[in-house]
Image (cartoon, grey):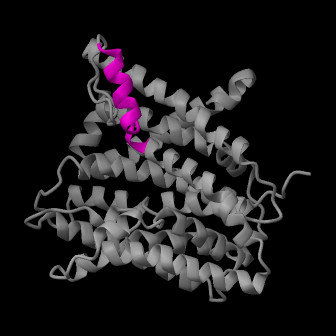
Amino acid sequence: MPAERVHAFDRLRVMATVGVVLLHGGAGIVGARRGEQTGFFTSLNAANVYDSAGRFAVGCFFMISAALLLAPERPFDVVRQTRKVLVPLVVWSFVYIAYAMWASTSGRSTPVNGSIGDPDVAAPVQILRDALAAPVAYHLWFVYVLVGLYLVVPLLRPLTARPTAERRGLLLYGVSILLGLELLARFVPQVWPGTPRLYVSFLDVFPSGFVGVFLLGFLLYHHPPRVPAAVPALVATCGFAWIVVAVWRQQSAEVPSLWAYENLNLPVLLFSAGVFTFVTRPAARLRPATRAVGVVSALSYRIYLVHALVLHVVRTEGPTGDLYQDSPVVGIPVAVAVTLVVSFAIAWLLGRVRPLRSVW
């Protein structure tokens, strides 16, 4: 019997899909002009605002997976679940490699940022080595982390299968340890530059990071905080504002840093947790999602895989590329909108090819 569909997650997937494209749209300007001194009301900081607005997305994607896959009432097959994301990862890695090789030989474009850079088509072994060394496109790191989380789900499900009262305390303890150490190592030096360095080797090998975010998603959904909806909305707003201001101030620092954009730093965690809690609060779960939202939600993974290639073309070629570079305030939303429409169309069309639906 199929598990009941969670309509709040459909809405959140659509929001997160838009968020990912938005942050990558803004990042193309912020990264290229990193360190440039700028006022708050400038085109560069507008790109920062767009980028910051999408930073909740990755954390929410992980938390949705946790809330579903760690639920004891839902079946889980680690091989099947891993294959669902791993096979498309391999297929799309070849797509991005092929595009990079075409861009390199034709000179008509540039490759999407990734591990293979500007490949030499006469050196296929080196291309393979580079492809194995890191994701071939910058956004595919997410899938590697997702696969890693899937592999530890069988170890986490015995915890989430405990009696409800006991489970909540254990989850709070687990999240506190896993995310607490991560935040301690990352955040304290930002607010106290002279702090002594902690025992880095220990923190590097301690299993934390995204496993903590994963457990946090299960905790927030299955044990939602009993607070008014305004509280998570305020937390999300504060996280977003913190990211914007921190990146803006760092842009003109002597040593510019984009630390506030990092998924495991406190501002982004607050933003992600606030959005997740607000959208999935018990009162919101009762409202069914529209059919259109359900369709986009079902295609969200495929849209994620293809969007980096579409966005790369949109922001580097033709009139949209000129608008993106010359007027980011308008150009970024235009690039994002075009990318979303084209990526959805590609994802939908690929889904019509039924024999190959599972490979991309």
Q: What span is colored magenta in the figure?
A: 123-139
List the single residue furthest toward the bottom: 227
Most frequent secondary structure within the magenta stretch = helix
Which residue does the image show at 42% across and 44% down from the upper left?
A: 139
Question: Taking 233 as reference, is 1 left or right?
Answer: right
- Quarter placement of the C terminus: top right
Residue 134 vertical placement versus 119 (above, below): below
Q: Is residue 40 visible?
A: no
Residue 237: image location, x then y, percent:
44, 76
Q: Quadrant of residue 124?
A: top left
Which residue does the image show at 55% across and 80% down from the upper left?
A: 232
Residue 219: image location, x then y, percent:
64, 75
Residue 87 vertical placement versus 224 (above, below): above
Residue 25: image location, x then y, percent:
36, 47
Residue 109: image location, x then y, percent:
29, 22
Which residue does the image show at 57% across and 77% down from the upper left?
A: 174
Which residue does the image show at 29% across and 69% down from the upper left?
A: 200
Residue 269 vertical placement versus 231 (above, below): above
Q: Quadrant of residue 322?
A: top left
Question: Taking 325 as reference, is 296 left or right?
Answer: right
List the single residue furthest toward the left: 254
> Which of 299 and 134 lies nearest the eye of the viewer?
134
> Which of 291 and 62 lies nearest the eye of the viewer?
62
Magenta span includes 280: no
Q: Is residue 275 visible?
A: yes
